[in-house]
Amino acid sequence: MNLDKYKVKINASLNATLRSYSQIFFSENKFFSILLLLVSFIDFWAGISGIIAVTVCNLTAFSMGFNKEKIKKGLYGYNALLVGIGTGLNFEPGIVLLILIIFAALLTLIITINIEGILSKYSLPFLSIPFLFGIWIVILASSHFDALGLSHRGIYTYNELYSAGGSTFVKIYDWFNSIKDFEILKIYLLSLGAIFFQNNLLAGILIAIGLLIYSRIAFTLSITGFFAAFYFYEITGSDFAQLEYTFIGFNYILTSIAIGGYFVIPSAKTYLWTLILLPITVIITISLQNLFLPWGIPIYSLPFNIVVILFIYALRQRITGNKHLTDTFTKQNTPEKTLYLNKTYVQIIKDKNFFPLNLPFWGKWTISQAHEGEYTHKGFWKEAWDFIIVDKENSQFKSSGEKVEDYLCYGKNIIAPASGYVMNINDGIKDNKIGDINTVQNWGNSIVIMHAEYLYSQLSHLKSGSFRVKAGEYVQKGQVIAEVGNSGHSPYPHLHFQIQASPFVGSKTIEYPLTNYISENETTEYKIFGIPKLNDKISQAVPHELIKEAIHLIPGQKISVISEIAGKSTETVWEVEKDYYNQTFIQCTETKSTAYFYSDETGFWFNNFYGNKKSLLFNFFIAFYNVKSAFYKDVSFNSFIRPNLFFNKILMFFQDFISPVYLFLKSEFKIFYIEEDADLSPEYVILKTTVKNSIFGNENKLLNFEIKILKSGIIQIIDNKSNKITINTKI
């Protein structure tokens, strides 16, 4: 048992060390980590110094009880690694250097923890700020360390090339330098190598290869950012040649990768912002060089840190989201996978910045006036809805319709569309006679509820004296707050509903979607988020009990799975768990495959899969990918599945290059609600799901599944090859 514990600790330490290398490029890729480790050893003593620094840092972090997940990802180690490599390169090897590196690594760890504590309050990354403080402190203090000798490595390039590879390396170096047209490429490669303090082409070439293998988006961004900086130097007449002998060119590479593909979901707009921000980075770089020059301190990665943190913080201050410039709320191990995963979120929840607002009533209502309406809803108040109730003959009143009481919606309860605080109530305004309007008290009896900062809902034309809440009171979603009336600018009873950014009755409206409703017009549609239109008959989606129970999976739950494939029956067990980040997942005890999922009152959807794609869990993942808890016969909806789950690596390699702009590989999930055996207390419901894979719009493969959900808690899935999976969620 003790031996197993030691093995776990050793593996954790090795992973933490390796990932510290690739984290410099925001990666956890093991191949890339090993390649970067080898690059650091192009200068042997620099490589040794880096290994010592990162090992000391990670072991100390483990022993002090800091966040193990962050240590394993290399998040606490990469700054100490850079300090170690930089220190090892600047000074001659010896016992004094070893002591200095150990204490510099410890200092960098302490700085890392403190800076993380400060910046995390604003949801900002610490990037390489701890490295800057660490290396600057070492440089400033070293002038008093007489026992340290300055290193001359890296000065006599030809001697070092000859000792490393003989005359062959020297000839290759001379040949490359003789090609004038590739001067910019040479400086790009040198800038890549400079990230690891290696001022040679071999380091740059190896890093470029590793970057290309790790991520096509990161690779193209590195080139985009570097060339944007180069041409800005050209336009302004600045000396770009200085990048060949200073450690600053990598600022442009790291800035473009961070902004274009890591902290912001890759898109055409992030590439555009890379082109915009790189000239700014150049300006900051040159100004900082002039500022730091009298002190004899290199600026290293300071411009990169300033630009990235300023830009991320600016994005966080936005009031509304932008689907083309969205910060990464769930990061994957490559920008491509982050992009593909985000597209699944976009299809399912549209935009994480939308606070969910439901319909403010029960039952089915009709929109008599929508946005930019025929009579009102114009100008500052154009984004609003008027709701009425109609009967089977499409009439909104009974009898003669001469009294407010004749109208089907009059006196009906109105509910809070979401939880929040009541900010304003206007009451005491009498109902109008049918056909009459009150132009003085235009909004009539109204209520304004604050749901979030800059997000308020207003409900108007309510019945006097019907309010069940008071100003300042906190209301729950679905709580009855008032009744429909006919007050204000209202010729007949109806409910006026609008979303606004301020707490006053009659404020300017904003366009904002409603969530989780059924819309009936020419077709019946299930809307996760949407803007209801004129004449739509809409109702809040109501969960179906069988589906609701089937998708109610909680951590600690065990699931029995029996498969029947080609006449052979096998049985296994899945377990529902929750990870450190509070993400819920199903794990197969046999294959260790893992499927992450999310569920709420609207339904269930898988958002990620790791492991064996031939496993039963993967079949369940694609068959049950996105199931809404409401059941409405003949309703269907589509959602996007990440293509990297279905297409081979060669196709994905080419797709990755242009994925921020265009997807020629697509995987689409579609679900159909087919049958339930009874309206009241049904014993089962039947769903059908398909996954269609296409290349440039041409169907490549189609997968079909029939799903039967039983009252007993059993889910039966049959694929298009008649293979059967029986899932019992209630063991």
Image (cartoon, rainbow, N blue to C red):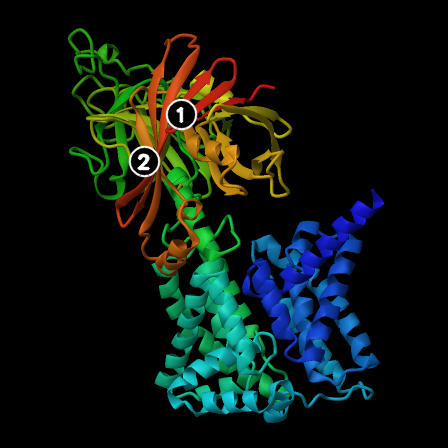
Instruction: Name the kind of residue labelled 1 in the image.
Output: Ser
Looking at this view, name the residue that lies furthest to the front.
Answer: 567
- Residue 219 is situated, as x and y percent measured from the top left of the image, at 45, 67
Q: Circle 2: is it few (<14), some (14-19), or many (20+) Cα within 10 Å?
A: some
- Residue 706 is situated, as x and y percent measured from the top left of the image, at 38, 24
Closer to the N terminus: mark 2 or mark 1?
2
The quadrant in which the C terminus is found is top right
Whether residue 115 can be seen here: no
Residue at the disc numbered 1: 722
- 171 in relation to 391, above or below: below
Which numbered disc covers residue 11?
none
- 46 in relation to 720, above or below: below
- Residue 604 is situated, as x and y percent measured from the top left of the image, at 46, 30
Q: Secondary structure at mark 1?
A: loop
Which numbered disc covers residue 530?
2
Left or right of 184, for residue 78 = right
Left or right of 716, for residue 2 = right
Whether residue 38 can be seen here: yes
The quarter of the displayed image where residue 273 is located: bottom left
Front disc: 2 or 1 = 1
Instruction: Name the kind of residue labelled 2 in the image.
Output: Gly
Q: In terms of depth relative to the viewer, which is nearer, 85 or 616? A: 616
Q: Secondary structure at mark 2?
A: strand
Q: Circle 1: is it few (<14), some (14-19), or many (20+) Cα within 10 Å?
A: some
State the separation of the CA atoms marked 2 and 1. Answer: 37 Å
Q: Residue at x 47, y 56 (%)?
A: 335
Q: Residue at x 18, y 16 (%)?
A: 394
C-beta proximity under 8 Å, tags 2 and 1: no
Q: In terms of depth relative to the viewer, which is nearer, 194 or 130? A: 194
- Residue 107 is situated, as x and y percent measured from the top left of the image, at 75, 68
Q: Residue at x 71, y 79 (%)?
A: 45
The quadrant in which the N terminus is found is top right
